[in-house]
Image (cartoon, rainbow, N blue to C red):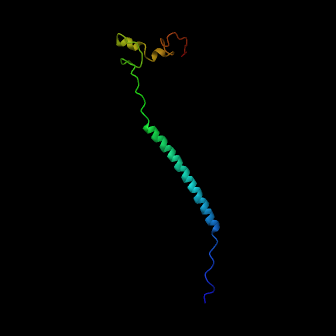
């Protein structure tokens, strides 16, 4: 009639053992990630709940300009000492006291 029954199932014990190892490794990695996330969460929560920094001390009694350029009496006096021409050495009258002479 049939010939003897069903064939024996293949031996999958090696594959099952490998799957178990892989699942154990995945579980270990998952637990490690959860621990790291918990650490980050606690640190961020601590930072968020920390008291604010103290307010800055008011030290300036009056506003002052960032550049300390002497105030001149007239606009022409104000422009006299602030341009780039005063610092140039290649034009006559530039770089006051400069001994650099560019031939040309």
Most distant residue in the bottom direction: 1
Of residues 77 and 100, the one drawn nearer to the viewer in this rendering: 77
Please state the horizontal and vertical placement of residue 52, each as a whole percent of the image: 42, 32
User: Quick check: 96 above or below 54?
Assistant: above
Please state the horizontal and vertical placement of residue 31, each as a whole percent of the image: 54, 52
User: Quick check: 75 above or below 4?
Assistant: above
Q: Residue at x 56, y 56 (%)?
A: 27
Please state the horizontal and vertical placement of residue 61, each as a whole percent of the image: 36, 17
Q: Quadrant of residue 49?
A: top left
Please identify the quadrant where the C terminus is shown.
top right
Left or right of 95? Residue 73 is left
Please state the horizontal and vertical placement of residue 7, each as a whole percent of the image: 62, 79
Of residues 85 and 92, the one drawn nearer to the viewer in this rendering: 85
Q: Residue at x 43, y 13 (%)?
A: 81
Q: Quadrant of residue 19?
A: bottom right
Please identify the quadrant where the N terminus is shown.
bottom right
Q: How many marks?
A: 0
Left or right of 74? Residue 47 is right
User: Quick check: 53 above or below 86?
Assistant: below
Q: Residue at x 64, y 71 (%)?
A: 11
Q: Residue at x 42, y 28 (%)?
A: 54
Q: Quadrant of residue 21?
A: bottom right
């Amino acid at each position: 009639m049939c010939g003897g029954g069903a064939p024996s199932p293949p031996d999958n014990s090696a594959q099952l053992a490998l799957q178990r190892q892989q699942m154990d490794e995945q579980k270990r990695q998952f637990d490690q990630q959860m621990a790291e996330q918990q650490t980050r969460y606690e640190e961020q929560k601590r930072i968020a709940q920390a008291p604010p920094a103290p307010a800055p001390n008011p030290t300036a009694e009056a506003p002052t300009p960032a550049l300390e350029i002497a105030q001149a009496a007239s606009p022409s006096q104000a422009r006299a000492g602030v341009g780039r021409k005063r610092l140039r050495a290649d034009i006559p009258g530039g770089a006051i006291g400069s001994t650099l002479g560019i031939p040309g």
